[in-house]
Image (cartoon, rainbow, N blue to C red):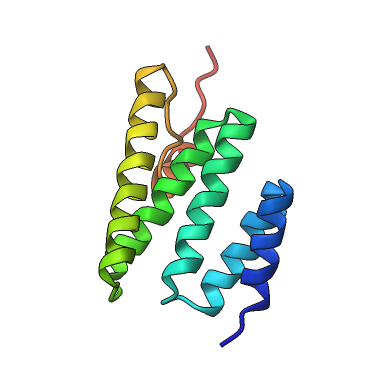
């Protein structure tokens, strides 16, 4: 089934429009939640954006998409499995390197809500 969002995301990724590519590929993932190429291209978009912007938070987003794909346990060909494994390890290692360099990942959504509810000290 043709996915216009995927095609648009790939085009925008090639043009270096990270925001547009990530947005389109996110929609493509919603349209085709079992498409391995959509997941891998979205991960690549986050990685490219992270490298271009020198922003480790984008690496964390790439890692989140990797975990999402892993947790879905979608059937993959041996080539897709090998490609995904290499991608997962590369992204994980880059996140670990960013942490070692002093970057602190954002808290999970659940903790953000807890933090916002805590009263501020007036000291």
- Pick out the residue farthest to the top: 123
Rendering coords of residue 53 (x, y %): 64, 31
68 to the left or right of 54: left
96 to the left or right of 58: left
- Pick out the residue farthest to the bottom: 1
Rendering coords of residue 46 (x, y %): 54, 47
Counting the numbered discs, the total is: 0
In the rendered image, which quarter contains the N terminus?
A: bottom right
Residue at screen point 52% across, 43% down: 47
**From the viewer's perspective, is residue 49 above or below residue 4?**
above
Q: Nearer the viewer, residue 112 or 26?
A: 26
104 to the left or right of 73: right
**Residue 33 sits in which quadrant?**
bottom left
Residue at screen point 28% across, 63% down: 81
56 to the left or right of 99: right
**From the viewer's perspective, is residue 120 above or below residue 32?**
above
Rendering coords of residue 68 (x, y %): 36, 60
**Residue 24 sits in which quadrant?**
bottom right
- Pick out the residue farthest to the front: 79
Residue at screen point 37% across, 54% down: 66
Rendering coords of residue 109 (x, y %): 44, 48
């Amino acid at each position: 089934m043709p996915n216009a969002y995927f095609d648009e995301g790939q085009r925008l990724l090639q043009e270096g429009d990270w925001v547009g590519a990530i947005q389109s590929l996110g929609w493509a993932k919603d349209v085709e939640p079992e498409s391995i190429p959509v997941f891998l291209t979205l991960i690549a978009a986050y990685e490219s954006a992270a490298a271009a912007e020198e922003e480790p938070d984008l690496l964390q987003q790439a890692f989140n998409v990797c975990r999402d794909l892993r947790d879905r346990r979608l059937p993959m060909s041996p080539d897709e499995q090998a490609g995904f494994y290499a991608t997962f390890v590369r992204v994980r290692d880059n996140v670990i390197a960013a942490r070692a360099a002093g970057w602190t990942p954002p808290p999970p959504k659940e903790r953000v809500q807890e933090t916002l509810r805590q009263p501020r000290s007036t000291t």
